[in-house]
Image (cartoon, rainbow, N blue to C red):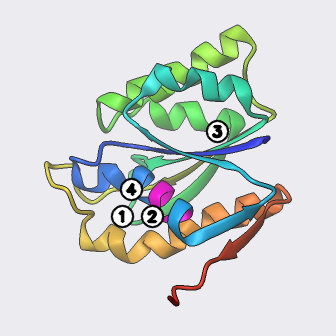
Amino acid sequence: MDVCVIGVGNILMQDEGVGPKVAEILKKEYQFDPQIEIIDGGTLGLDLLPYIERFNKILLVDVVNFHKEPGFIKVLKGEEIPPYLKTKLSVHHVGVQDLIEVARLMGYMPEELVLVGIQPESIDLGLDLTPTLTVKLNELIEEVIKILQGWGIKCVLQSHQK
């Protein structure tokens, strides 16, 4: 298995939980060929280093402060990622930035590292995404699927029939 999708974020802080939500939807609603690993990275930060070591291609999904309107989606690759993580939205961003830097220092950087980021509307306490991000969820997942397909992964949406 060469590919890993990691949904990063805090599910207790509204839009901060979008990464884990995307990971959950991908696990439940899609089949991938060849198989990929999908991880709810939560707020693990440096504890995700073993995943960085194991995979050639890693796709992170997270909220990012792009200084744009809520729901704005952008794909960042490789060296484009760290500058955006310097503007921290929450404590776990320190962990993600540190994770990338430690991996780089240890020589564990994957061949490809991609971050699909979305501008949050609110990161206040709350279990649900804001309506703005809820509406953008399918578009965010489509971006993830597009990247996976570009990596040669077949992504099949499962039927919801019983």
Residue with the most extreme left position: 125
First in sequence: mark 3 vs mark 1: 1
Q: Which span is picked out in magenta? A: 22-26
Instruction: Give the distance between the C-alpha atoms of the residues marked 1 and 2, in whole angstroms.
Output: 6 Å
Callout 1–callout 2 Cβ contact below 8 Å: yes
Task: State the residue position of label 2.
Answer: 72
Callout 4–callout 3 Cβ contact below 8 Å: no
Quarter occupied by residue 31: bottom right
Q: Amino acid at mark 4?
A: Val
Picture coordinates of residue 74 (x, y %)?
Answer: 56, 57
Foreground disc of the pair 4, 1: 4
Q: Main secondary structure of the magenta part?
A: helix
Q: Secondary structure at mark 1?
A: loop
Q: Secondary structure at mark 2?
A: loop
Q: Which mark is residue 18?
A: 4
Q: Amino acid at mark 3?
A: Glu
Q: Is residue 6 left or right of residue 32?
A: left
Instruction: Give the distance between the C-alpha atoms of the residues marked 4 and 2, in whole angstroms.
Output: 13 Å
Q: Is residue 137 in sight in this rendering?
A: yes
First in sequence: mark 3 vs mark 2: 2
Please, is residue 162 above or below residue 54 in the view?
A: below
Foreground disc of the pair 4, 3: 4
Instruction: Give the distance between the C-alpha atoms of the residues marked 3 and 2, in whole angstroms.
Output: 17 Å
Instruction: Give the distance between the C-alpha atoms of the residues marked 3 and 1, in whole angstroms.
Output: 20 Å
Task: State the residue position of label 1.
Answer: 69
